[in-house]
Image (cartoon, rainbow, N blue to C red):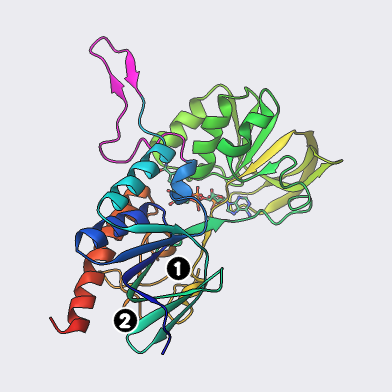
Amino acid sequence: MSTAENWDLIIIGAGPAGLTAAQYGARANLRTLVLEQLAPGGQALLIEALENYPGNVGLTDPGGTRIAEPRTGFEFAQDLQRQAEAFGARILTEQVTGLRKEGDRFVLTLGNGETRAAGAVILATGAEHRLLGIPGEKEFTGRGVSYCATCDGPFFRNKRIFVAGGGDSACDEAQYLSRLSSQVVLVHRRDRLRAQKALAERTLKNPRIEVRFNTVIREIRGEGKVSSLVLERSDNAGKGTGETWEEGADAVFVFVGAAPRSSLAFKAEKDENGYILTSQGMESSVPGLFAAGDVRSSPFRQVVVAAGEGAVAAHCAAGYLDALAGS
Ligand code: NAP
C-alpha cells in the first residue's frame, strides 16, 4: 500500500468544473485538493466576454447607455478560485502524470515524483484544441499561427488575420480580433456557421470580419513567419473541390474544436471520441472516479454546464465517500 499524503477528494483540473467541484467538496467538509498543471481557469480564461453565463449580464442605463460589460472569463475564474479557497479547498500547481486504484484509494503520481491519495477523484481536465494538421502549421506556431486570440492577437494589430473554424470559439475569437484589425477573415469549410445563433449573427454582421464559407486552409507558407495561405474551395460536407489559390496573410488563429484530456482515466468507459461516459451523478465506470466539464461525454459544452457538473460530481463524491465509510 502506498504511503502517499491522504485527502478525501482530489480534483484534477481547475477550470470551471474543477473549481466548482472544489467549492462544493470543501463545503461538504471533505478535505479537498485541486491539482492544476497551468493557471486556474482552464479554457474559460480565453473567453473575452462570458455573456451567456446566467447572471453575468452587461448593464445598460435607462437612457440606453452601456454602463457595464459582462465579466471576462479571466475575472470569472479568479472569483471561482477565491470562492473555492475561501471554503477551504487547497489548490496546487502540479501536473498529474499517473492515476491508479489501490483497494479503495486512488493514488496519483505527480510530475515532481511525489504521490497523493484520495478516496474519490474528480477528473475535470477539460479538452485541448485540435490542430488543422496541414503543412506549415507546426513550423509557424508562435510565428503567426496561434490558438489563443487574447494571448497573441495584440501582435497582429491592423494586420491581415485569418481565423479557421465555424463554431463558438472561432466566432468569439474573431470578434475579439476584429477590435485589433479590420482585416479579419473567418474561413469555414461549410456554408453555415455552427456557432450559437446570436454569436453567429453578430459575427456575420461585423463589418470588420469577412466570413468566407466553403473554404479550407490547405497550407501555411512564409519565411520565418506566416506570409500567405493556400486556400481551397470546399463543398457543403467540407471536402475540397480542387480549386485552390494563394492569399497574403500575417496570422492564422485556429479554432477547430477540441479533444478530451481523458488519458488518466484509462480504465473508465469512454465514447467514440474519447470523452468519459458517466452516470447521472457524474461517476465513471470506475467506482469513486468522477468526471465533470469538457472531459465528460455531453451534448453541450459550456461554462455553465461545466460548473453544474462540478457541483453534481462533488455532491455525489461526498455520498460515495460516506457509503465507503459505512455512515
Ligand atoms: P466546435 O463547436 O466543435 O466547432 C469546431 C469548428 O471547427 C466547426 O465549425 C468545425 O466544422 C470546424 N472544424 C473542425 N475540424 C476542422 C478542420 N480540420 N478544418 C476546418 N474546420 C474544422 O468547437 P469550438 O468552437 O471550439 O467549441 C467547443 C465547445 O465549447 C462548444 O460546445 C462550444 O459551444 C463551447 N464554447 C462556447 C463559447 C461561448 O458560449 N461563448 C465559446 C467557446 C466555446 P464543421 O462545422 O464543419 O464541423
Magenta stretch, residue numbers: 47-68
- Amino acid type for the residue under numbered disc 2: Pro
Does residue 64 belong to the magenta stretch? Answer: yes
Picture residue at 51% right of the left edge, 73% below the top: 114
| Above or below, comparing residue 43 to residue 11 in the picture | above
217 sits left or right of 80 in the view:
right
Of badges 2 and 1, nearer the viewer stands 2
Q: Nearer the viewer, residue 112 or 157?
A: 112
The part of the image, by quadrant, that contains residue 14 is bottom left
Does residue 65 belong to the magenta stretch? Answer: yes
Element assignment for label 2: loop
Q: Which of 31 and 154 is in front in this view?
A: 31
Label 1: how many residues lie within 10 Å, few (<14), some (14-19) or many (20+)?
many
Residue 292, percent from left and from top: 36, 63
Q: Quadrant of the C terminus?
A: bottom left
Q: Quadrant of the N terminus?
A: bottom left
Residue 302, percent from left and from top: 38, 50
Q: Which of 85 and 179 is in front in this view?
A: 85
Q: Name the residue under label 1.
A: 275
| Residue 287, label in figure | 2
Picture residue at 22% right of the left edge, 70% below the top: 318
| Above or below, comparing residue 281 to residue 57 in the picture | below
Question: Which secondary structure dominates the residues rendered in magenta?
Answer: loop
